[in-house]
Image (tube, rainbow, N blue to C red):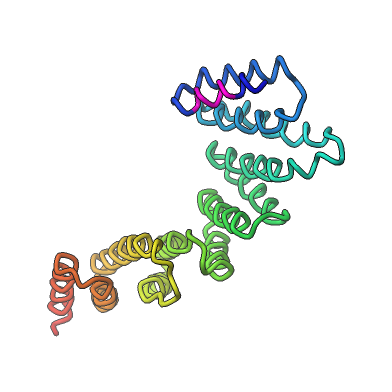
């Protein structure tokens, strides 16, 4: 079992997914039960999903749960993390397959598990995204707001701001969109050094997209507010000068 599992993982690392899937299949068929079974099913499911075999992938992820239930009571605690991961992968597979309503349901179930706070936050973000993709605009807006409020230090917060602002803009809630974008641009919470560049990237992307939308719609005062806030993000002339120019255009349109 050790040799077959090692070979399957080696094929995965080399990007030979078909051979990896065949190796996992051979392992699980030859040695149907054992300590390796939950982990092997989990890894096989990921490979099958990457190959586009979503139904087979789901079957493997469910096998993780079923085989773990058959373990001796003293061994189950060793596999709780694997089971939680399998439940998350089930939700992720539904999301990738475009079955957004099922994805929302499974991600929300994951939020109720005794998982690490960062994992629950990840599931909450994914549930919000799946809700948006399902076309449920109002619930998605509420979900993104709740995620930001509950997880202010999470790595995905700046992306959630971007998605929330974009969704509000698409839903013709322009004032709220402006408010959310300014909140992101003026974010003053403590940001870890290694996260600052990611925050800046999302701030720039969100601000530029919304400022351009306001300008094109003729809402020059709102565009001006955003261009001013964007200019404060960096002292680099290559960044600031185009934004100062855009401010000039807004003033011109406002006959100021």
Quadrant where the image shows the N terminus: top right
| Res 202 → quadrant | bottom left
Image location (x, y in percent) of residue 159? 43, 59
Above or below residue 79? Residue 59 is above
Total count of labels: 0
Residue 210, compared with residue 114, is above or below; it is below
In the image, what residue occupies the spot 53% across and 39% down? 96
Query: What range is drawn magenta here?
Result: 6-12
Residue at the spot 28% in from the left edge and 76% down from the top edge: 229
Q: Nearer the viewer, residue 197 or 133?
A: 197
Residue 54 location (% of width, % of height): 58, 30
Say left or right for 250 vs 22: left
Q: Percent from the top left, x then y, of residue 251?
A: 16, 79
Residue 183 placement, left or right of 26: left
- Residue in view at x 63 percent, y 50 percent: 107
Residue at (18% x, 75% y) in the render: 247
Q: Nearer the viewer, residue 62 or 168?
A: 62
Q: Quadrant of the C terminus?
A: bottom left
Q: Nearer the viewer, residue 127 or 33?
A: 33
Question: Measured along the vertical axis of the image, is residue 95 above or below residue 170?
Answer: above
Pick out the residue farthest to the bottom.
256
Q: Is residue 7 magenta?
A: yes
For residue 206, which quarter of the picture? bottom left
Q: Is residue 11 left or right of residue 253?
A: right
Farthest-out residue, front: 2
Q: Can you give x and y, in whole percent of width and height, for residue 124 in the image?
A: 59, 57
Query: What secondary structure is the stretch in magenta mostly built from?
Result: helix
Magenta span has 22? no
């Amino acid at each position: 079992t050790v040799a077959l599992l090692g070979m399957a993982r080696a094929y995965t690392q080399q990007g030979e997914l078909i051979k990896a899937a065949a190796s996992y299949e051979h392992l699980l068929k030859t040695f149907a039960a054992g300590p390796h079974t939950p982990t092997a099913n989990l890894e096989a499911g990921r490979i099958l999903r990457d190959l586009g075999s979503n139904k087979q992938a789901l079957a493997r992820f469910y096998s993780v749960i079923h085989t773990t239930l058959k373990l001796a009571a003293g061994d189950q605690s060793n596999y709780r993390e694997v089971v939680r991961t399998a439940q998350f992968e089930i939700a992720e597979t539904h999301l990738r397959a475009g079955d957004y309503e099922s994805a929302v349901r499974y991600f929300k179930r994951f939020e109720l598990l005794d998982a690490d706070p960062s994992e629950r936050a990840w599931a909450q973000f994914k549930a919000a995204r799946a809700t948006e993709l399902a076309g449920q605009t109002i619930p998605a807006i509420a979900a993104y707001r709740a995620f930001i409020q509950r997880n202010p230090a999470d790595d995905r917060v700046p992306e959630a701001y971007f998605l929330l602002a974009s969704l509000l803009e698409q839903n013709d809630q322009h004032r709220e969109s402006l408010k959310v974008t300014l909140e992101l641009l003026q974010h003053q919470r403590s940001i870890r050094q290694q996260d600052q560049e990611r925050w800046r990237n999302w701030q720039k992307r969100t601000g530029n997209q919304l400022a351009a939308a306001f300008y094109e719609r003729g809402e020059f005062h709102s565009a001006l507010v955003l261009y001013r806030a964007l200019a404060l993000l960096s002292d680099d002339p290559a960044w600031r000068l185009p934004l100062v120019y855009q401010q000039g255009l807004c003033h011109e349109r406002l006959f100021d």
